[in-house]
Amino acid sequence: MSDYISHDHEHDGIDRRGFLQCMAWAGTGLLWTVSGGILASKTLAQIAKAGEPLPATDLSFLQISDSHIGFNKEANKDVTATFKIALDRINAMPTPPSFLIHTGDITQLSKPEEFDTFDEILKSCRTKDVFYVPGEHDVLNDGGKLYRDRYLKRVEAKGSGWYSFNKNGVHFIGLVNVLDLQAGGLGQLGDEQLEWLEADVKDLGTSTPIVVFAHIPLWAVYPEWGWGTSDSERALGYLKPFGSVTVLNGHIHQVLQKVEGNVTFHTAMSTAFPQPAPGTAPSPGPMKVPAEKLRSLLGLTSVQYKQGKTALAVVDSNLS
Amino acid sequence: MTTLTPRNKTIASLFAIGCLSLSNFALAGDVKDTDGTSSKQNTIDIKDFAFNPQTITVKSGEKITWTNRDDEPHTVVSVEKQFKKSSALDTDQTFTITAGAPGTYTYFCSVHPKMTGTILVVKS
């Protein structure tokens, strides 16, 4: 890929693609903002320590993912403790996020008591507004009924749990790709959900920034491990006309990012345990790391949107 | 939980065998059928997100037991809904079925659908 600037809309020496590439290789723990055309970065820890407020942006929200409450194996014997640390980090932010998005796998085994524990711990979070999409661990035995009753009634979700909403001119779409999976296949959205999606975005102006969130990646991260969604291409087809699409996923417990045209794909860390990089282990199961290293591989994702800027800034920070 | 004495253990074992004959669920090991004959145990380990062995040949009427050796829940679900699906199996949990009519039965893990397996049932 070329490193030359191809589109310099704002005559500031930064094109969008280059900006996103910077973000992609910059790694975790940095907050990227564009202010007056100058690219700036600071670690979240630096900002929290200095007590300096985050630069004013039109909208900021946080993605948390893969809490796996109930997991108690070697990879992390106390997932409630690390989930609490993640919430402490959110509470320590000088400018609290407008809301949270949880991209699935709240629980390890879909047990009511696991959901209870999660809800109880979440009460300590200062940010109260939370939007959810299920992971496969949340819908193990009942096709997601309990999950929908608990987390999706408020948003009047359709079908197996999909919905959309608007915040500050940004259109958010929560999708479900963990149900009715087919033998040998990947994550799946299904015809009914895709038809809904097509209708949902049909009348939106193409300059409307879109944020799509779902559990399993909506791009082929590593199909050999099931890390992809079989019919995601069709979904992305409906989003092609839009100038700014940000896709936020969980499931793979690590940060990976890809930029394709106007679409930025991003996966978040888990708050419970890491998983191996694609193809680096016999299976994608929970990865055991030395205790002192664990928190550096867990984390959360902050997303900032500034009106008039095309790209949303997506920033990961770990729990070290 | 009450500690089992040897006497209690015997009673518990008898009780367990009684229950097993009433359901498809069984513990690992040799299982007595209601007629008192011993049937062969066919075991499949679920390890590293795979069924091992991936293809198994069993005789009609024999039992097949899956054991989850991963730190991740898995399920056993018939592709053609030919047998009752398992619940989500946590680490070390087992699921047992009795092989029915001769034929080919394919199954997968509904949590990780890339995981597939085949049971070939032959005449006993």
Image (tube, coloured by chain):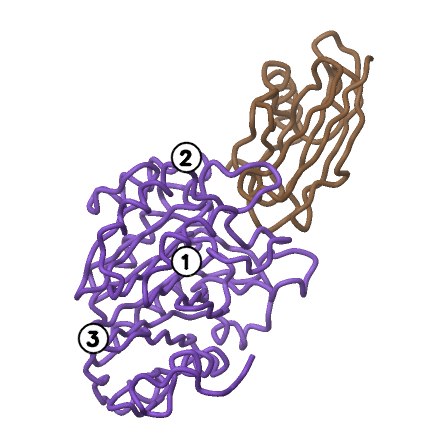
Chain colours: A purple, B brown
For label 3, the SS is loop
Looking at the image, tell me whether mark 2 or mark 1 is earlier in sequence order: 1
Disc 2 element: loop
Earlier residue among tags 3 and 1: 1
Quadrant in the picture for residue A149: top left
| Viewer-side label of 3, 1 | 3
Foreground label between 2 and 1: 2
Point out residue B87 in the picture as x, y percentages from the top left corner: 52, 32
As drawn, the label of residue A67 is 1
Seen from the viewer's position, the closer of residues B12 and A127 is A127
> Do the residues indicated by labels 2 and 1 lie within the same chain of the protein?
yes
Q: How crowded is the residue under tag 2: few (<14 C-alpha within 10 Å), some, or many (20+)?
A: some
Residue at horizontal 78 percent and vertical 31 percent from the top: B56
- Tell me the subunit letter for badge 2: A
Residue at 38%, 79% in the rendered image: A16
Label 1 sits on what residue type?
Ser
Q: CA distance from mark 3 to mark 1?
A: 32 Å
Q: Nearer the viewer, residue A97 or B2?
A: A97
- Residue A171 is situated, as x and y percent measured from the top left of the image, at 24, 59
The correct choice, above or below, for B80 with respect to A307 in the image is: above
Which amino acid type corresponds to the residue marked 2 in the rendered image?
A: Gly
Sequence order check, earlier mark of 2 and 3: 2
Quarter in which the C terminus of chain B is drawn: top right
Which of these two is toward me, A121 or B100? B100
Q: CA distance from mark 2 to mark 1?
A: 20 Å
> Label 3, on which residue?
A307
- For label 2, the residue is A143
